[in-house]
Image (spheres, coloured by chain):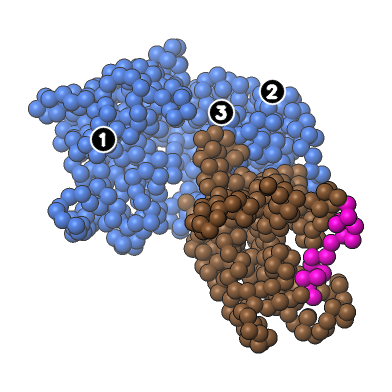
Amino acid sequence: MSGKRGGRIRDRRQFRTVQRDGRRREKPEEKTLDNKVPAVRMCGITKTFFGKVRANHNVSIDIQRGEILSLLGENGSGKTTLMNMLSGIYCPDCGTIEVDGREVSIRSPKDALNLGIGMIHQHYKLVDVMTATQNIILGLKEEKYDLKAASARVREICERYGFELNPEQKVYDMTVSQKQTVEIVKVLYRKADILILDEPTAVLTPQETEKLFAVLRNMKKDNKAVIIITHKLNEVLEISDRVDILRAGEFVGSLRTSETNAQEMTDMMVGRAVALNINRPEPKNPEPRIEISNLTVRSEEGLLKLDDVSFTINSGEILGIAGISNSGQKELLEAISGLQKVEKGDISYIGEDGKKVSLIGKDPLDIQRMGVALSFVPEDRLGMGLVGNMDMVDNMMLRSFRAGRGLFVNRNRPRAVATHVKDSLEVVTPGLSTPVRRLSGGNVQKVLVGREIETAPSVLLTAYAVRGLDINSSYVIYDLMNQQKERGVAVVYVGEDLDVLLELADRIVVLCGGKLSGILDGRSTNKYEVGSMMTTLGGGEAR
Amino acid sequence: MFDLISFIPRAVAQATPLLLGSTGETLTEKSGNLNLGIPGIMYVGAISGVIGAFFYEQKVGSVENANAFLAIMIPMACCLLGSFLMGFLYCFLTVTLRANQNVTGLAMTTFGVGFGNFFGGSLIKLTGSDVPSIALSITHQFYAAKLPFAGKAGVFGELVLNYGFLVYVAIVIALLASFFLNRTRRGLQLRAVGENPSTADAAGINVAAYKYWATCVGSMIAGLGGLYYVMDYASGVWSNDAFGDRGWLAIALVIFTIWRPNVGILASLLFGALYILYLYIPTGTNMAIKEIYKMAPFVVTILVLIVISLRKKRENQPPAALGLPYFREDR
């Protein structure tokens, strides 16, 4: 369990407070079509975090056995929270959960598994040095400890559903897709027949996605109930029987996939109020700032991370970088800022005076001095850029401690910067001297991005700057980037949410498996074009 | 000429405390606790055994009155209790209060040595003896008791059968620990706790309980190493600070064996041999050369570290969460 999700029993007391009045106001009739008792029915579920952030409000969904249900919604619409309540990680503030028509209370993942509910999270929980089988039987108590028998059962499960998995393989030798398979088999091994998959395709290649879908169809035939959390419309259409749509934590409707289309789903998903409206000023006399030509980067393990990528980053413009995760975005930014060894190709910085300097082989510090600022928000947020145990002032000082003369550092300027960042970005913190680690994720991000902007860079590299942020904070960050753009800074924005990329970026570079799939104009392209270029080189057939 | 027949038994005698210490530390480290308090714990184990033996000997007076069972069990029970309490304290500080493991461990070592020297000194005062040591000859007789025919069974008897019972206990414990770690469900779960506690937690394993159990049992095993040292190796003679750097060698041995207690059986013999090698190599009067030979076990450990980090084999790496406190809601 990642720490954030760890407080699984926080609201246990309130769980019994059932609110029945507001059941299924908006839901169409077709759910009673089969006239069966649903495998799972969640009624009037409401969940609030810290008393103010409303993650789910009065949501009701249900799912039959032998059905694949998609839970569709934008980032932050409460899909994962809802499913976490079903799998015992959170307890709902109010509402009821029924399994096979019986009201149940689910207080821990164990309770959920006992009811046959298993969830496959986005971040896998596996022990690297152990084999697939060892991971699968971890924590089980009942039977005799017999790895051979367990492996045989794993093989049997794999055969039944069409997984490809070697039970004796060590997890560290596995690809992401194989690790996901281990996680799914782990849940099946525990005899779960209601499976929840949280964005299962986010890290998969198209081929792996196809395999996964084939497996899911086999499960459906086996009369299991499968719920997929996703925000990809093509997947919804391809795999699911029904789709339930959430928007800003509320249930907005349920559709039969066979009777709907992408347009209708998009309309329901985006809704009237939430329509993204990010300001996008015209770039003012853009000129090349960074030129990347034939860039090839290999990871330490020798895997090709970037393959012959060439493009230009212009001043006064926001360049979006799209791609499914791990397509080389991180390596690209690290190569520009001098943190990553380049195998082939060139990166040149073109100053305002038109002077061209190659960045290859330069020290990260020198690159920083030239005005290239990197604010990379890694998955764990504190991994790069900030020191969790230091306070805001000290973290600001990480950029400026070399300034000044003599032995002693000057703490006044960083303090002023920290105060400015705190006020202008509305960082919620007990005080400047609170360790950054204690701030919430969104506030940590504001500190990081704010600090990079304070250095007045000429190139600003951001990756996942709004990851995990609520809508308001995200908009603060978008505004910041637009301000930088208007000041003539070349902004690179690596993002996950295509809608935002399309609204914010002037041009979009699409990466696919480390290769440049194409460069699109942010104003004229659409989600489907970008999406298909992300999954197939050059785009292929746009849906 | 190099006298193997006398060299090997001496090496075994040196190896046994190291083997017990490293088996205990391996179990502990497999739970993710880097217990650097092992030298102190072995020291406390030894002095606790000495205290028990001392009062028992005071009571019975002579060998004829002593009961073999009690003479063995009283010191052993005291030793296990003392080292258990040390392990428990370490767990309380690092698991429950999540104190830094390195700092806690080093403090435990300093504390353990001080504790041992204080009570050792007190007992020496009680006996009123002229030499700064206590001789527990009755207990020693029972601990060093050998099979009656061992001495007559030729070279085999000399090399294999002619030891006190704790030597065999140490080997059996090491084999059992290996079996436990690799062949049982609890062993698997213990390793999962040391590798990835959050995964173990998600799988429904009680992380804190495993850490407590592994560390306390590990400490008790290590404590026996201290007991063996005093009662058998040192002929029942306790003198302050005589235990030396054996505790640190035991920790080095854990790395040397790449966290495998069964490998430890032979590796500890190698360490024991290297430790006394200087006695068998003609060095003349030059003490400095002796000191260089005494370094050998540590040099070998460094070499092993270099080799395993070059090979980059994941199974040979320390438990991934070694030294890190686990807190479910941490980010």
- Tell me the colour chain B is drawn in: brown
Decide whether residue A218 is among the magenta residues.
Answer: no
* Position in image of residue A243 (x %, y %): 56, 31
- Tell me the colour chain A is drawn in: blue
The residue under label 1 is: A363
Write down the region rendered in magenta.
B138-153
Mark nearest the camera among 2 and 3 is 3
- What residue appears at the point 88 percent right and 55 percent down from the top-left corner? B152
The CA span between labels 3 and 1 is 33 Å
- Residue A133 appears in the figure: yes
Pointers 1 and 2 within a single chain: yes
Residue A378 figure quarter: top left
**Which SS class for mark 3?**
loop
Q: Chain of mark 3?
A: A
Q: Nearer the viewer, residue B112 or B233?
A: B233
Furthest residue to the left? A353
Looking at numbered disc 1 in the image, what kind of residue is underneath it? Asp
First-in-chain label (3 vs 1):
3
Q: Chain of mark 2?
A: A
The residue under label 3 is: A175
**Which SS class for mark 2?**
loop
In the image, A53: left or right of B49? Answer: left
The CA span between labels 2 and 3 is 17 Å
Looking at numbered disc 3 in the image, what kind of residue is underneath it? Thr
* Position in image of residue A468 (x %, y %): 42, 43
The residue under label 2 is: A162
